[in-house]
Image: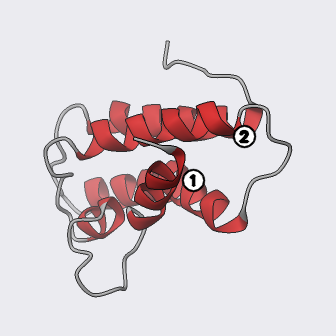
């Protein structure tokens, strides 16, 4: 996966309102559905590619920054809201969302961080 593909993939995962976006992470979570198999792995891979390409950068484009925010923060809010509404999320989703948040933070800091 190259940088442009990874960037586009991450941005696409945050679409909620567009048609034909039922498989995006935010859309699925908004509907109380778990990620599709491999979706979290693909997001983490894309985040790592973006990190590698931006670790020396001093700026980040607004569209990507907004996508990173949504993947890091909005997914946590949707997870908590879903749980409160009685959604039974997959057992490892909370930890996966934390990994996404840490990877997004790594992109902003320029230093890769791990969950533990």
* Front position in the image: 23 or 50: 50
Q: Quadrant of residue 15?
A: bottom left
Q: Which mark is residue 116?
A: none
Disc 1 target residue: 68
Give x and y (percent) for residue 43.
Answer: 37, 44
Q: Alpha-carbon neighbours of circle 1 within 10 Å: few (<14), some, or many (≥20)?
A: many
Q: Residue at x 40, y 66 (%)?
A: 12
Residue at the extreme top of the image, as rendered:
116
Q: Earlier in the sequence, mark 2 or mark 1?
A: 1
Give x and y (percent) for residue 40.
Answer: 30, 41
Q: Residue at x 46, y 61 (%)?
A: 8
Q: Is residue 52 left or right of residue 44?
A: right
Question: Does residue 98 lie above or below 6 as drawn?
Answer: above
Q: Is residue 46 left or right of residue 59?
A: left
Q: Is residue 51 left or right of residue 20?
A: right
Residue at the extreme right of the image, as rendered:
58
Q: Secondary structure at mark 1?
A: helix
* Front position in the image: 28 or 111: 111
Q: Which mark is residue 108?
A: 2
Question: Does residue 115 lie above or below 78 as drawn?
Answer: above
Question: Does residue 70 lie above or below 6 as drawn?
Answer: below
Q: Are marks 2 and 1 in contact (CB under 8 Å)?
A: yes
Q: CA distance from mark 2 to mark 1?
A: 9 Å
């Amino acid at each position: 996966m190259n940088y442009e593909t990874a960037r586009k993939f991450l941005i696409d995962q945050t679409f909620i309102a567009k048609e034909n976006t039922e498989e995006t992470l935010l859309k699925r979570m908004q509907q109380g559905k778990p990620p599709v198999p491999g979706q979290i792995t693909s997001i983490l891979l894309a985040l790592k590619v973006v990190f590698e390409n931006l670790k020396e950068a001093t700026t980040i484009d607004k569209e990507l920054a907004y996508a990173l925010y949504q993947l890091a923060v909005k997914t946590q809010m949707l997870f908590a809201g879903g749980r409160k509404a009685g959604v039974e999320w997959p057992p490892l989703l909370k930890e996966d969302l934390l990994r996404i948040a840490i990877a997004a933070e790594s992109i902003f800091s320029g230093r890769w961080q791990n969950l533990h």
